[in-house]
Image (cartoon, grey):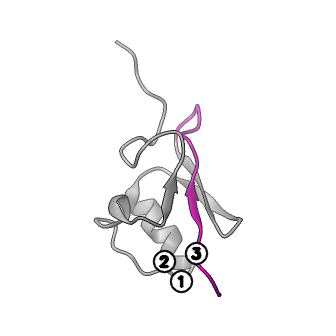
Amino acid sequence: MSGPIRVIVHPPSPTGGRRVRVDGEILGLAHNLVDLAEFLRRAGLEIDAADVASVPWIDWRGAGPNHWGPETTS
């Protein structure tokens, strides 16, 4: 693969989880950083789950790496 890899983590869905795309291909619905790291590993990108939140090449859309599902209201 040439050029920079484009990873997009879409906004949390209303039912929980976030869709993950790598170079335009949907990899699945991640529910946490461990899921995201596994999707990236399967795509050939070795990264530890502890480092996923801080890498600059992931485009977090709609919310940061700490938000994975519908927010509860009090």
State the quadrant of the C terminus. Answer: top left
Q: Main secondary structure of the magenta part?
A: loop
Q: Are discs 1 and 2 less than 8 Å apart at CB?
A: yes
User: Which label lies toward us, 2 or 3?
Assistant: 3
Sooner in the amino-acid sequence: mark 2 or mark 3: 3
Q: Position of residue 38 (x, y in %)?
A: 46, 70
The amino acid marked with disc number 1 is: Gly
Q: Which residue is mark 2?
A: 41
Please tell me which residue is depicted at 51% across the width and 72% down the height of the picture. Answer: 40
Q: Are discs 3 and 1 less than 8 Å apart at CB?
A: no
- Left or right of 42? Residue 35 is left
Q: CA distance from mark 1 to mark 2?
A: 5 Å
Q: Judging from the image, what secondary structure is the residue with disc 2 in?
A: helix
Query: Callout 1: few (<14), some (14-19), or many (20+) C-alpha neighbours within 10 Å?
Result: few
Q: CA distance from mark 3 to mark 1?
A: 11 Å
Position of residue 55 relative to residue 32, above or below, is: below
Q: Judging from the image, what secondary structure is the residue with disc 1 in?
A: loop
